[in-house]
Image (cartoon, rainbow, N blue to C red):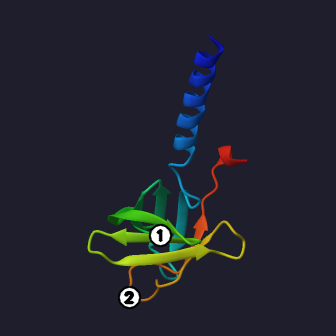
Amino acid sequence: MKSKRLMACAAIASSFSLLIGCGNAYEGTYRALDGFLGPLMVLEVTGRKAHATKVDIIRNIVLSEEDFTVEDKSEKLLITNSRGKTFAFSRSVNEKDLECLNCGFGTGLPKVWQKIIKNNDF
């Protein structure tokens, strides 16, 4: 009887460990301004996917949206769009924001991204 209970507990523990391992260290929502007055860029990273939205903050409209695949590799976040272009991010000095290593003028993504902290994160 004890061995069945022990096996059941082991099965539950292993399923929880699998669920915990599904995410990555970069999960969350980040924002950046592309230029002085925008547009505002929002990058949401969840598991193996990311979604970027570009919003005109003056006219309050969505300009574009793009999906990415996510890879967490040797302390870097790699996101790849549907055209095969990969962008590499690393943690900022404050260890919560992101810095894009190959973004900037002409790439469509800003270099510096701030993590958005929700009220329930405290």
Q: Read off the residue under disc 2.
A: 106
Lower position in the chain sequence, tag 2 or tag 1: 1
**x and y, in percent, of residue 44 in the image:** 47, 58
- Measured Cα–Cα span from mark 2 to mark 1: 16 Å
Q: Which residue lies furthest to the bottom in this view?
A: 105
* Local crowd size for mark 2, using a 10 Å CA cut-off: few (<14), some (14–19), many (≥20): few
**x and y, in percent, of residue 98 in the image:** 59, 72
Q: Which residue lies furthest to the left in this view?
A: 83
Three-letter amino acid code at the position of disc 1: Leu
| Residue at image point 39% right, 84% down | 107
Between residue 104 and residue 17, name the one nearer to us.
17
**x and y, in percent, of residue 108 in the image:** 39, 79
Please tell me in which quadrant of the rendered image residue 53 appears.
Answer: bottom left
Between residue 110 and residue 47, name the one nearer to us.
47
Comparing labels 2 and 1, the label whose residue is closer to the camera:
2
**x and y, in percent, of residue 58 in the image:** 44, 69
Image side of residue 121 versus residue 69, left or right: right
- Number of numbered callouts drawn: 2
* Local crowd size for mark 1, using a 10 Å CA cut-off: few (<14), some (14–19), many (≥20): many
- What is the secondary structure assignment of the residue under circle 2? loop
- Residue 87 vertical position relative to residue 30 in the rendered view, above or below: below
Q: Read off the residue under disc 1.
A: 40
Three-letter amino acid code at the position of disc 2: Gly
Residue 60's label in the rendered image is none
Image side of residue 9 versus residue 79, left or right: right
| Residue at image point 45% right, 65% down | 71
Please tell me in which quadrant of the rendered image residue 20 appears.
Answer: top right
- Residue 93 vertical position relative to residue 23 in the rendered view, above or below: below
| Residue at image point 36% right, 64% down | 68
Between residue 82 and residue 32, name the one nearer to us.
82
- What is the secondary structure assignment of the residue under circle 1? strand
